[in-house]
Image: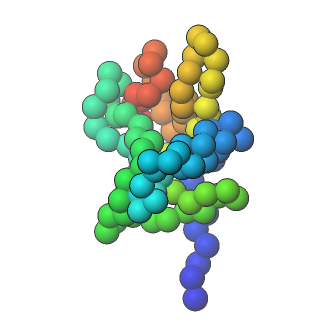
Amino acid sequence: METALSIPVQFTPSASAEIIRLMNEPDFDSNKKLRVGVKGGGCSGMTYILEFDEMKPNDETYQTEIFSFIMDKSHAIYLIGMEVNWEGGLNSRGFTFKNPNASSTCGCGTSFAV
């Protein structure tokens, strides 16, 4: 029996729409899944990962209402409760991250400290 995993990261409707748009591109590699995570670096110590990648041994799969994503099990402590948004305006374009676990963030919005 499989257990449904609680989704640690939420996606706004605009972020979900942009992810689906990217997945529907003609050259999209359907063997890859959306990866959400963190890595060391950036001006505040850690940087968000949002990319399409192959499944790795330490990954968990999560299912939203629209798509699934993968995340390294160890990254959940940094990302639980985070909201991913897509801004498509002229002044601000791209994915943004609202993370309640971040003690500080930098001006670029993609780097944080815990």
The residue sitting at 46% across, 50% down in the picture is: 28
Q: Quadrant of residue 47?
A: top left
Quarter of the C terminus within the rendering: top left
Q: Does the rendering let one see residue 114? A: yes
- x and y, in percent, of residue 50 in the image: 45, 42
Q: Does the rendering let one see residue 80? A: no
Q: Quadrant of residue 58?
A: bottom left
71 or 13, nearer to the observer:
13
The residue sitting at 44% across, 19% down in the picture is: 108
- x and y, in percent, of residue 15 in the image: 63, 39
The residue sitting at 63% across, 24% down in the picture is: 88
Q: Is 15 located above or below residue 60 in the figure? A: above
* Residue farthest top in this picture: 91
- x and y, in percent, of residue 17 in the image: 66, 42
Q: Is 5 located above or below residue 80 in the figure? A: below
* 26 left or right, relative to 91: left
Q: How many marks?
A: 0
* Residue farthest bottom in this picture: 1
- x and y, in percent, of residue 57 in the image: 31, 68
